[in-house]
Image (cartoon, rainbow, N blue to C red):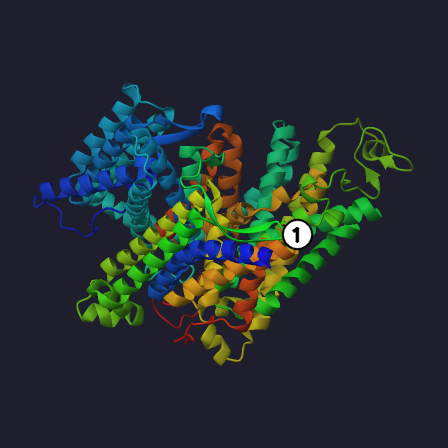
């Protein structure tokens, strides 16, 4: 339902004024509403529910569907009106929808929320037209957008520094209880994964849909080495990274000659293969049951526990403070913070090296790169391996933090989430990844009730960003020199 | 031998379903050069619409199986086509002329949206449905092992062959098919000669979705169950089939589908069920590495 309302309005440059064809607009809106009805008729109108012995039975939601279609009809009409210079109509319809959603008793709370949101969006759309129409307003918008472009670009380092300062002091602030720390660790893990994938997708322009496979390699490397051979986290961390990078090379070597979209599907297949192997090679990986009892990281050999195990000392005895369960989380938080910052630092440095320049050049035009003597396969391979290495680091951290891993944590949807963080942030932008991770991981964790709509929102965000703002929240760094002026590559 | 024959029959049935999905991938790739990642989920939508269609039929008291099948077939094709059309119009058309990976990322988004939409609207649990056609023909029996050809398998093969024949005629003999092939060869030139390119691309998506709907319906009838996630694996395997046959080639898609069906069924029958998906993925990787143009494809020359 929401998809249909996202339809772009009629041409933006349409003449404003009285020459507005109402019957055509109404017909267009009617077609849109009917299409939405056709899309939803079976899927929404007839909900199949299993009644055990009675088999599948219908639950009818045809009224919901009708309400949604009417809302879509009105919304489409209002958008056409706004695009043709009738913002008042848009505003009135928006207000009416909002009032109806709040005042009438709709069949489901979901409809109430969605229709209210449509109403608010329409009212904002009308306000936008009015703002543009008043001469002062349009000048202000033009000035704002141009100064914002340069101003924010200059401000990013300051934003970044402020965010970093906050991240460093956050664990010591009064509100930092266990829940907040857990969320902080989760967000930072995704920031690190996003930065790692950014090297592959954002800089080198290789769409990797199996990134989670390298994450899994790192996690299983640490889990197996620590539980079966007793290796400590700090030894396993580099080993896991190297192992993941080796997997990257192993996979990348044959497939990186492929064109971009083939590469995406092959990496997706590789991710699935890794998951299937993890599930079925029970002797080695414990299969779907997963590996438990993974030891956490230690500080110079001191463990985080209330009672020290045989032959070890605990952290709180060593430092001489009262035991608290939060210490472990705070420590883990700083570990992932440092790991993420290393990822960022290495990426920023690599960008200025010849190999980083080659990645960006390759992203823009592969044939031109070949003509200039850059070996595309080797260059892509370095990006792939370095990205995989950071995923391996993050994976072994994940295993150490969770203390339990199973193949369920490494499914395709995980890759898709990381990819949508990179895409939403603006491919290639380091700061954008942080914003997107906070937005995509932090918000849904905060609003647990919306959990079931979370993936729907992820998918919608990916489509809408590609359609309306393909450069992401924070535009990526453009290449310094372009071959095709319009970026046709 | 009997075991082999039985597996062969099963493989051909599965291959027919993969082939029908693969046609959608190959046509879309041929005309606009993008991998329609959401195509597997269109197939899943088709399966759901067929399930609901059969339930409505039994509510209305249409008990005669052939009539119910034909009705549901038309219903599923029509309503799934709307999905195909809407996806192209909303998520792909605005991206023409955007950067190279944009349509693929958008398609991944559409795939996630469709899966979660169906999960929310219909629930996450698998939906079982009693088979519409039961019974089978015993072809051969030896050593207590019978080779059976079930009626549903016959229906699947007959419908697939009939659809393929009709589809080939449509592409080769009608004005719509001619326009479609013209756009595939040179979109700009076709537009200059008066072909409505947007309409032709929409038509391609609609046809692909209709084929996927038939595949979804057959899948639902064959396995008697459908859930919101079936499109993912089936979609990737059908894509593998399209690549194996040579992407852009319609007979190739069908051939690739049959081959993937054979590989999967025989792998599961003679080696291990757990790793049958790995077999299909490995085939994809191997084909792309050693013969990226597939069996029947033409080599693609990349132009600057």
- Quadrant the C terminus of chain A occupies: bottom left
Return the residue nearer the eye: B85 or B8.
Answer: B8
- Left-right relation of A432 to A196: left
Quadrant assignment, res A26: top left
Where is residue A454? Give x, y as percent: 47, 37
Residue placed at 42% from the left, 63% from the top?
B253
Residue placed at 61% from the left, 27% from the top?
A175
- Quadrant the N terminus of chain A occupies: top left
**Is A58 located above or below residue B34 in the figure?**
above
Return the residue nearer the eye: A199 or A295.
Answer: A295
Residue A465 seen: no
Where is residue A130? Give x, y as percent: 20, 39
Residue placed at 76% from the left, 42% from the top?
A297
Instruction: Kindly identify which chain the residue marked by label 1 belongs to.
Output: A
Question: How many residues crowd around disc 1 within 10 Å: few (fewer than 14), some, or many (20 or more)?
Answer: some
Return the residue nearer the eye: B270 or A437.
Answer: B270
- Left-right relation of A318 to B273: right
- Residue furthest to the left in view is A19
**Is A410 located above or below residue B249 in the figure?**
above
Give the secondary structure at mark 1: helix
Q: Which residue is mark 1?
A: A277
- Left-right relation of B156 to B144: left
- Residue furthest to the right in view is A311
Task: Please give the count of numbered marks on the rendered protein.
Answer: 1
Residue placed at 36% from the left, 40% from the top?
B49
Where is residue A90? Give x, y as percent: 20, 35
Residue B256 seen: yes
Where is residue A479? Give x, y as percent: 45, 65
């Amino acid at each position: 339902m929401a998809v249909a309302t996202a339809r772009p309005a009629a041409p933006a440059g349409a003449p404003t004024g009285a020459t507005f064809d109402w019957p055509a607009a109404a017909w267009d809106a009617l077609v849109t509403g009917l299409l939405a009805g056709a899309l939803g008729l079976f899927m929404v109108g007839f909900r199949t529910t299993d009644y055990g012995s009675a088999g599948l039975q219908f639950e009818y939601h045809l009224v919901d569907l009708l309400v949604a279609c009417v809302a879509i009809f009105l919304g489409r009409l209002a958008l056409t009106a706004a695009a043709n210079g009738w913002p008042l109509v848009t505003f009135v319809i928006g207000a009416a929808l909002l009032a109806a959603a709040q005042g009438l008793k709709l069949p489901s709370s979901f409809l109430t929320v969605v229709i209210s949101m449509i109403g608010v969006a329409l009212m904002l759309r009308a306000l936008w037209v009015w703002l543009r129409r008043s001469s002062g307003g349009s000048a202000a918008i033009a000035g704002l957008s141009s100064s914002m472009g340069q101003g924010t670009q200059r401000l990013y380092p300051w934003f970044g520094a402020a965010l970093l300062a906050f991240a460093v002091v956050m664990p010591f602030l009064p509100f930092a209880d266990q829940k907040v720390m857990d969320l902080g660790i989760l967000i930072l893990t995704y920031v690190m994964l996003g930065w790692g994938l950014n090297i592959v997708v954002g800089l080198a322009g290789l769409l990797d849909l199996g990134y989670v496979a390298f994450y899994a390699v790192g996690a299983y490397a640490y889990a197996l080495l620590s539980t079966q051979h007793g290796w400590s986290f700090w030894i396993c961390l580099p080993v896991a990274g190297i192992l993941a990078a080796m997997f990257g090379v192993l996979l990348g070597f044959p497939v990186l000659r492929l064109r971009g979209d083939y590469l995406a599907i092959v990496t997706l297949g590789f991710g699935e293969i890794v998951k299937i192997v993890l599930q079925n090679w029970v002797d080695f990986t414990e299969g779907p049951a997963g590996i438990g009892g993974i030891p956490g990281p230690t500080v110079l050999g001191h463990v985080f526990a209330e009672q020290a195990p045989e032959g070890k000392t605990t952290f709180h005895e060593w430092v001489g403070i009262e035991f608290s369960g939060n210490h472990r989380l705070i420590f883990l938080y700083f570990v992932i913070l440092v790991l993420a910052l290393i990822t960022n630092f290495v990426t920023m440095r690599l960008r200025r090296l010849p190999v980083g320049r080659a990645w960006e050049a390759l992203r823009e035009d592969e044939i031109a790169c070949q003509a200039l003597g850059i070996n595309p396969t080797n260059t892509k391979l370095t990006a792939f391996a370095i990205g995989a290495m950071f995923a391996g680091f993050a994976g072994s951290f994940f295993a150490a933090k969770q203390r339990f891993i199973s193949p369920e944590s490494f499914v395709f949807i995980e890759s898709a989430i990381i990819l949508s963080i990179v895409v939403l942030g603006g491919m290639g932008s380091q700061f954008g990844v942080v914003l997107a991770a906070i937005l995509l991981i932090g918000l849904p964790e905060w609003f647990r009730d919306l959990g079931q709509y979370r993936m729907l929102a992820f998918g919608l965000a990916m489509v809408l960003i590609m359609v309306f703002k393909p450069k992401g929240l924070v535009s990526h760094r453009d290449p310094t020199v372009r071959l095709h002026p319009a970026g046709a590559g | 031998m009997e075991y082999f024959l039985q597996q062969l029959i099963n493989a051909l049935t599965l291959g027919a379903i993969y082939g029908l999905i693969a046609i959608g991938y190959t046509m879309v790739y041929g005309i606009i050069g993008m991998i329609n990642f959401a195509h597997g989920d269109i197939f899943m939508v088709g399966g759901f619409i067929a399930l609901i269609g059969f339930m409505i039929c039994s509510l209305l008291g249409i008990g005669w199986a052939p009539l119910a099948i034909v009705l549901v077939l038309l219903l599923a094709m029509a309503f799934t086509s709307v999905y195909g059309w809407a996806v192209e119009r909303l998520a792909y058309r605005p991206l023409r002329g955007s950067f190279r990976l944009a349509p693929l990322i958008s398609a991944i988004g559409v795939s996630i949206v469709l899966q979660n939409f169906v999960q929310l609207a219909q629930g996450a649990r698998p939906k079982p449905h009693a088979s519409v056609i039961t019974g089978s023909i015993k072809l051969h029996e030896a050593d207590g092992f019978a080779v059976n050809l079930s009626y549903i398998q016959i229906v699947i093969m007959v419908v697939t062959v009939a659809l393929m024949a009709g589809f080939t005629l449509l592409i080769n003999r009608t004005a719509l098919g001619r326009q479609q092939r013209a756009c595939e060869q040179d979109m700009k030139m076709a537009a200059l000669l008066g072909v409505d390119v947007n309409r032709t691309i929409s038509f391609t998506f609609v046809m692909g979705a209709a084929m996927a709907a038939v595949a979804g319906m057959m899948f639902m009838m064959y396995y008697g169950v459908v859930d919101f996630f079936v499109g993912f694996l089936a979609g990737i395997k059908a894509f593998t089939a399209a690549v194996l046959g040579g992407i852009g080639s319609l007979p190739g898609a069908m051939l690739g589908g049959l081959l993937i069906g054979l590989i999967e069924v025989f792998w599961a029958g003679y080696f291990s069920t757990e790793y049958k998906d790995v077999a299909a993925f490995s085939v994809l990787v191997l084909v792309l590495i050693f013969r990226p143009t597939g069996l029947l494809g033409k080599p693609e020359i990349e132009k600057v």
